Amino acid sequence: MIIENRRQLAEYFGVGNVVICVRGEIRTHPIDDDYLDQAISNAIFNHTRCGAWARFTSGYTEPETVTKTWLLDIRRTIVGIQLYRARLQSSSHWYRPENFPPALMDALQYDGLERRERKWYITDPQTVALVVDVLKTRTYPQKYFHLEVDMPITQPIEGVCLTLGSIVEGVEQEATPIPLWFPFESTDLDNALEQIEQECDEIWYSTHGCPDCWTYDRAIPEHEKERLWLVGATFVNPICPTCEGEGIII
Ligand SMILES: [Zn+2]
Protein backbone atom coordinates (compact mmCIF):
# COMPACT_ATOMS: atom_id res chain seq x y z
CA MET A 1 0.00 0.00 0.00
CA ILE A 2 1.36 3.39 -0.98
CA ILE A 3 1.06 6.27 1.47
CA GLU A 4 0.91 9.49 -0.50
CA ASN A 5 0.60 12.16 2.17
CA ARG A 6 0.06 13.05 5.84
CA ARG A 7 -3.68 12.36 5.69
CA GLN A 8 -3.22 8.84 4.35
CA LEU A 9 -0.53 8.30 6.97
CA ALA A 10 -2.95 9.37 9.71
CA GLU A 11 -5.52 6.95 8.30
CA TYR A 12 -2.90 4.19 8.24
CA PHE A 13 -2.45 4.61 12.00
CA GLY A 14 -6.21 4.91 12.52
CA VAL A 15 -6.02 8.53 13.72
CA GLY A 16 -7.38 10.21 10.58
CA ASN A 17 -10.77 10.83 12.13
CA VAL A 18 -12.16 12.22 15.33
CA VAL A 19 -15.35 10.84 16.78
CA ILE A 20 -17.56 13.44 18.41
CA CYS A 21 -20.95 13.32 19.99
CA VAL A 22 -23.38 16.01 18.84
CA ARG A 23 -26.77 16.10 20.63
CA GLY A 24 -26.53 12.43 21.44
CA GLU A 25 -25.51 11.50 17.91
CA ILE A 26 -22.08 9.97 17.20
CA ARG A 27 -20.35 11.61 14.26
CA THR A 28 -17.02 10.93 12.62
CA HIS A 29 -15.08 13.86 11.18
CA PRO A 30 -11.80 13.87 9.31
CA ILE A 31 -9.14 15.35 11.57
CA ASP A 32 -8.24 18.98 10.93
CA ASP A 33 -5.10 19.57 8.81
CA ASP A 34 -3.54 21.53 11.68
CA TYR A 35 -3.64 18.52 13.98
CA LEU A 36 -2.47 15.87 11.53
CA ASP A 37 1.24 16.07 12.46
CA GLN A 38 0.51 15.88 16.18
CA ALA A 39 -1.95 13.01 15.75
CA ILE A 40 0.54 11.03 13.64
CA SER A 41 3.41 11.71 15.98
CA ASN A 42 1.32 10.60 19.00
CA ALA A 43 0.21 7.49 17.11
CA ILE A 44 3.80 6.53 16.25
CA PHE A 45 4.89 7.17 19.85
CA ASN A 46 2.13 4.89 21.18
CA HIS A 47 2.49 2.33 18.41
CA THR A 48 6.18 1.62 19.19
CA ARG A 49 7.68 -0.03 22.29
CA CYS A 50 10.52 2.49 22.25
CA GLY A 51 8.23 5.52 21.87
CA ALA A 52 9.62 6.64 18.52
CA TRP A 53 9.39 10.27 17.47
CA ALA A 54 8.20 11.50 14.08
CA ARG A 55 8.97 14.84 12.45
CA PHE A 56 7.87 16.37 9.20
CA THR A 57 10.08 18.60 7.09
CA SER A 58 9.82 20.05 3.62
CA GLY A 59 12.82 20.09 1.38
CA TYR A 60 14.51 18.52 -1.57
CA THR A 61 14.42 14.80 -2.01
CA GLU A 62 17.22 12.80 -3.47
CA PRO A 63 17.90 14.25 -6.90
CA GLU A 64 16.08 12.37 -9.60
CA THR A 65 17.39 11.86 -13.10
CA VAL A 66 15.36 13.31 -15.92
CA THR A 67 16.19 13.59 -19.59
CA LYS A 68 16.08 17.07 -21.03
CA THR A 69 16.85 18.42 -24.45
CA TRP A 70 19.77 20.78 -24.40
CA LEU A 71 20.60 23.20 -27.15
CA LEU A 72 24.31 23.52 -27.48
CA ASP A 73 25.70 26.47 -29.41
CA ILE A 74 28.95 25.52 -30.97
CA ARG A 75 31.30 27.62 -33.08
CA ARG A 76 34.23 26.79 -35.19
CA THR A 77 37.41 28.68 -34.36
CA ILE A 78 40.91 28.36 -35.69
CA VAL A 79 41.93 26.33 -32.66
CA GLY A 80 38.99 23.95 -32.65
CA ILE A 81 35.28 23.47 -32.19
CA GLN A 82 34.30 25.59 -29.23
CA LEU A 83 31.25 25.05 -27.06
CA TYR A 84 29.96 28.58 -26.79
CA ARG A 85 26.84 28.21 -24.68
CA ALA A 86 24.24 25.69 -23.59
CA ARG A 87 20.63 26.19 -22.78
CA LEU A 88 17.51 24.28 -22.00
CA GLN A 89 14.50 24.58 -24.24
CA SER A 90 12.91 26.48 -21.40
CA SER A 91 14.16 29.94 -20.59
CA SER A 92 17.17 28.71 -18.59
CA HIS A 93 20.47 29.20 -20.29
CA TRP A 94 24.08 29.34 -19.35
CA TYR A 95 26.42 31.47 -21.41
CA ARG A 96 29.56 30.41 -19.68
CA PRO A 97 30.31 26.72 -19.67
CA GLU A 98 31.90 27.09 -16.23
CA ASN A 99 28.43 27.99 -14.95
CA PHE A 100 26.75 24.96 -16.51
CA PRO A 101 24.90 22.66 -14.15
CA PRO A 102 27.42 20.05 -12.90
CA ALA A 103 25.52 17.14 -14.44
CA LEU A 104 25.64 18.74 -17.88
CA MET A 105 29.31 19.44 -17.49
CA ASP A 106 29.97 15.86 -16.45
CA ALA A 107 28.03 14.51 -19.41
CA LEU A 108 29.83 16.81 -21.83
CA GLN A 109 33.22 15.93 -20.44
CA TYR A 110 32.31 12.29 -20.74
CA ASP A 111 31.47 13.01 -24.38
CA GLY A 112 34.94 14.42 -24.99
CA LEU A 113 34.77 18.02 -23.94
CA GLU A 114 38.05 19.61 -23.02
CA ARG A 115 38.69 22.79 -21.13
CA ARG A 116 41.41 25.11 -22.29
CA GLU A 117 41.71 28.07 -19.98
CA ARG A 118 38.23 29.59 -19.79
CA LYS A 119 36.93 27.98 -22.95
CA TRP A 120 35.59 24.56 -23.68
CA TYR A 121 36.36 22.64 -26.86
CA ILE A 122 34.81 19.54 -28.31
CA THR A 123 37.51 16.96 -28.88
CA ASP A 124 35.44 13.86 -29.39
CA PRO A 125 36.33 12.98 -33.04
CA GLN A 126 32.80 11.88 -33.94
CA THR A 127 31.22 15.10 -32.73
CA VAL A 128 33.92 17.18 -34.39
CA ALA A 129 33.35 15.32 -37.69
CA LEU A 130 29.60 15.88 -37.37
CA VAL A 131 30.03 19.60 -36.76
CA VAL A 132 32.49 19.97 -39.61
CA ASP A 133 30.17 18.06 -41.99
CA VAL A 134 27.20 20.23 -41.13
CA LEU A 135 29.21 23.41 -41.48
CA LYS A 136 30.38 22.28 -44.95
CA THR A 137 26.78 22.18 -46.17
CA ARG A 138 26.26 25.83 -45.32
CA THR A 139 26.65 28.11 -48.29
CA TYR A 140 27.06 31.24 -46.19
CA PRO A 141 29.46 31.96 -43.36
CA GLN A 142 27.99 30.46 -40.25
CA LYS A 143 29.12 31.71 -36.91
CA TYR A 144 27.29 29.28 -34.67
CA PHE A 145 26.14 25.77 -34.94
CA HIS A 146 23.19 24.62 -32.85
CA LEU A 147 23.25 21.09 -31.69
CA GLU A 148 20.35 19.46 -29.90
CA VAL A 149 21.23 16.76 -27.45
CA ASP A 150 19.06 14.74 -25.12
CA MET A 151 20.96 14.33 -21.95
CA PRO A 152 20.07 12.95 -18.56
CA ILE A 153 20.54 15.47 -15.79
CA THR A 154 19.76 15.25 -12.13
CA GLN A 155 17.44 17.75 -10.61
CA PRO A 156 16.16 18.11 -7.09
CA ILE A 157 12.49 17.44 -6.43
CA GLU A 158 10.71 19.30 -3.67
CA GLY A 159 8.82 17.14 -1.24
CA VAL A 160 7.76 16.32 2.30
CA CYS A 161 9.85 14.06 4.47
CA LEU A 162 8.77 12.05 7.48
CA THR A 163 11.77 11.40 9.70
CA LEU A 164 11.53 8.69 12.36
CA GLY A 165 13.83 8.25 15.31
CA SER A 166 13.92 7.44 18.99
CA ILE A 167 15.93 8.43 22.01
CA VAL A 168 16.88 5.97 24.71
CA GLU A 169 16.31 7.41 28.18
CA GLY A 170 19.36 7.61 30.40
CA VAL A 171 22.05 7.46 27.70
CA GLU A 172 23.32 9.80 25.03
CA GLN A 173 22.76 7.29 22.25
CA GLU A 174 19.71 7.32 20.04
CA ALA A 175 18.45 5.26 17.15
CA THR A 176 19.69 6.42 13.76
CA PRO A 177 16.96 8.65 12.29
CA ILE A 178 15.35 7.27 9.13
CA PRO A 179 13.91 9.63 6.49
CA LEU A 180 10.96 8.57 4.35
CA TRP A 181 9.92 10.83 1.51
CA PHE A 182 6.29 10.86 0.48
CA PRO A 183 5.02 8.83 -1.26
CA PHE A 184 6.35 5.66 0.34
CA GLU A 185 5.26 2.05 0.73
CA SER A 186 3.62 1.16 4.04
CA THR A 187 6.07 -1.76 4.27
CA ASP A 188 8.97 0.73 4.17
CA LEU A 189 7.37 2.55 7.09
CA ASP A 190 6.88 -0.69 9.04
CA ASN A 191 10.47 -1.75 8.32
CA ALA A 192 11.80 1.66 9.40
CA LEU A 193 9.91 1.47 12.71
CA GLU A 194 11.07 -2.11 13.26
CA GLN A 195 14.68 -1.08 12.60
CA ILE A 196 14.36 1.73 15.16
CA GLU A 197 12.84 -0.65 17.72
CA GLN A 198 15.71 -3.08 17.24
CA GLU A 199 18.33 -0.36 17.49
CA CYS A 200 16.75 0.98 20.69
CA ASP A 201 16.63 -2.54 22.15
CA GLU A 202 20.32 -3.00 21.37
CA ILE A 203 21.17 0.30 23.05
CA TRP A 204 18.94 -0.47 26.05
CA TYR A 205 20.26 -3.99 26.62
CA SER A 206 23.88 -2.87 26.30
CA THR A 207 23.55 0.04 28.73
CA HIS A 208 20.73 -0.54 31.20
CA GLY A 209 21.91 -3.53 33.22
CA CYS A 210 21.32 -3.32 36.98
CA PRO A 211 24.17 -3.69 39.54
CA ASP A 212 23.25 -7.36 39.98
CA CYS A 213 23.09 -8.29 36.27
CA TRP A 214 26.59 -9.77 36.09
CA THR A 215 27.40 -10.24 39.74
CA TYR A 216 24.38 -11.85 41.39
CA ASP A 217 25.74 -15.39 41.26
CA ARG A 218 29.27 -14.54 42.33
CA ALA A 219 30.60 -13.94 45.78
CA ILE A 220 31.26 -10.29 45.20
CA PRO A 221 30.81 -7.78 48.03
CA GLU A 222 28.04 -5.19 47.59
CA HIS A 223 30.45 -2.22 47.29
CA GLU A 224 32.44 -4.08 44.60
CA LYS A 225 29.26 -4.80 42.62
CA GLU A 226 28.48 -1.10 42.69
CA ARG A 227 31.99 -0.27 41.50
CA LEU A 228 31.87 -2.82 38.65
CA TRP A 229 28.53 -1.42 37.57
CA LEU A 230 29.82 2.15 37.63
CA VAL A 231 32.88 1.32 35.50
CA GLY A 232 30.66 -0.02 32.75
CA ALA A 233 29.68 -3.63 33.34
CA THR A 234 26.22 -2.52 32.28
CA PHE A 235 24.92 -5.12 29.84
CA VAL A 236 21.53 -6.48 30.80
CA ASN A 237 21.82 -10.11 31.80
CA PRO A 238 18.70 -11.90 30.53
CA ILE A 239 18.76 -14.29 33.52
CA CYS A 240 19.35 -11.64 36.18
CA PRO A 241 16.90 -12.34 39.05
CA THR A 242 16.94 -8.74 40.33
CA CYS A 243 15.75 -6.92 37.20
CA GLU A 244 14.40 -10.11 35.56
CA GLY A 245 16.35 -9.39 32.39
CA GLU A 246 14.59 -6.11 31.85
CA GLY A 247 17.38 -3.78 32.94
CA ILE A 248 16.71 -0.65 34.96
CA ILE A 249 15.91 2.94 34.20
CA ILE A 250 19.12 4.94 34.61
ZN1 LIG B 1 19.73 -7.03 36.37
Image (tube, helix red, strand yellow):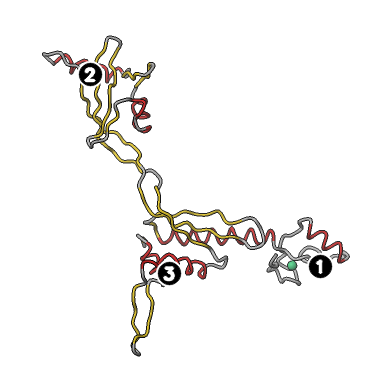
Name the quadrant where ligand 1 sits: bottom right
Question: In what element is the residue under mark 2?
Answer: helix
Residue 161, percent from left and from top: 42, 55
| Tag 3 residue | 13
Hey, which quadrant is residue 215 in on the image? bottom right
State how far apart marks 1 and 2 are (Cα). 84 Å
Q: Earlier in the sequence, mark 1 or mark 3?
A: 3
Mark 1 Cβ and ligand 1 under 8 Å apart:
yes
| Direction from residue 70 to residue 26 in the image, left or right | right
| Mark nearer the viewer, 1 or 3 | 3
| Residues at circles 2 and 3 in contact by the CB criterion of under 8 Å | no
Crowd rating for badge 2 (residues with CA inside 10 Å; few <14, some 14–19, many 20+): some
| Mark nearer the viewer, 1 or 2 | 2
Q: Residue at x 27, y 20 (%)?
A: 127
- Position of 178 relative to 238 (above/below): above
Between residue 130 and residue 84, name the one nearer to us: 84
Between residue 244 and residue 170, name the one nearer to us: 170
Q: Quadrant of the C terminus?
A: bottom right
Q: Earlier in the sequence, mark 1 or mark 2?
A: 2
Between residue 85 and residue 221, name the one nearer to us: 85
Residue 99, percent from left and from top: 35, 29
Q: Earlier in the sequence, mark 2 or mark 3?
A: 3
Q: Residue at x 38, y 76 (%)?
A: 18
Question: In what element is the residue under mark 1?
Answer: loop
| Tag 1 residue | 216
State how far apart marks 1 and 3 are (Cα). 43 Å
| Tag 2 residue | 131
**Label 3 is placed on what type of residue?**
Phe
Residue 178, percent from left and from top: 50, 54
